[in-house]
Image: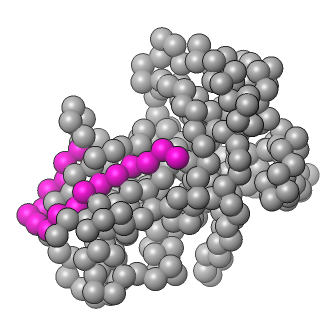
Amino acid sequence: MIALVAAPATTANLGPGFDVLGAALDLEAAFAVREGPSSFVWPEGMDDPGEPNLFLEAFALAFQSRGLRVPEVSVEVTRLLPLRSGLGSSAAAICAGLRAADAFLDRPLDDRETLRIAVGLEGHPDNVAACLYGGVTIASSAKETLVRRLPAPNLRAIALYPGGSTSTPRARARMPASVPRQDAVHNIGRTALLVYALLQGDYGLLRAATEDRLHEEQRIGGCDWCTAAREAAYAAGALAMPVSGSGPTMLALAEPQAASAVRQVLEPFATGRPEAFVLDLAFTDRSARLEAL
């Protein structure tokens, strides 16, 4: 048996919605999974990054959660997301691993089991919720993670990745353990405004609604090119430009008719930087899924 699985890139936070908001993007990772012997094949020309393999961990946990033996499988990565870029590569690996497990289980995981395992591996729910459900997701974790989904907005997301990588644990460690009350209130208000703007299609609110006081300064504070890129994107018609997840990618949100102009002004910021790119992406309702057996 061969199982083909795919999982979308995601962006987390969308500015103020730290650890709560996420959205799926139309860039995907894809994997081909065959029954044994055990192996994991990266795309041609790519060395094993030498980190925990979240696809295989998630695949194994699906069986272990049922008290079952983990079968031997051969996995080939047929499409890969940029690693440690703020575009949800770890969430995609986790969610694809869980969807792949469904193909080998007698009874697939239900949504609650899948979400529980995914959040446990990722450590926070924003990216995995968006990857599992598609669209824009609101995830709240306490004893149990609750997720509600909004449809994908009719916006373009122009991703500026300047090269390099960000460690999510290190990025989170730079954040203070407590914040002033006025900053917490600011982010609560902006997050509520952002959800309203996306539900109503009131995109003129997005620049104000994506303002953050909890995490973005710790992640891009002092970054001259970040400030210049935002100013250029706004001048070209972007509605907002939050940091994507832990960064270093920034995501310029624009209506479709302005996307080309925004992309053009952002491309010089990627020029001359190893591995840098600018991608014009759409938000998508597609989620992590088993595509074929």
Give the position of the C terminus as an image quadrant: bottom left
Residue displayed at 48% across by 11% down: 272
Residue displayed at 42% across by 24% down: 275
Give residue 234's position: percent from left, percent from top. 79, 25
Relative to 5, residue 27 above or below: above
Residue displayed at 43% across by 56% down: 7
Name the one closer to the observer, 67 or 10. 10
Relative to 90, residue 241 above or below: above
Relative to 85, residue 114 above or below: below
In which quarter of the view is residue 193 placed?
Answer: bottom right
What colouring style does the render use?
Answer: one colour
Give residue 42's position: percent from left, percent from top. 23, 44
199 vs 285, left or right, is right
Give residue 127's position: percent from left, percent from top. 56, 57
**Over which residues does the magenta segment extend?**
26-42
258 vs 203, left or right, is left
Give residue 197's position: percent from left, percent from top. 84, 52
Residue farthest front in this picture: 257
Name the one closer to the observer, 49 or 194. 194
Q: Is residue 170 visible?
A: no
74 vs 129, left or right, is left
Q: Is residue 46 visible?
A: yes
Q: Main secondary structure of the magenta part?
A: strand
Residue displayed at 59% across by 13% down: 268
Q: Is residue 40 magenta?
A: yes
Total labels: the figure holds 0
Residue farthest left in this picture: 37
Q: Is residue 266 magenta?
A: no
In which quarter of the view is residue 270 placed?
Answer: top right
In which quarter of the view is residue 224 placed?
Answer: top right
Relative to 169, residue 259 above or below: above
Give the position of the N terminus as an image quadrant: bottom left
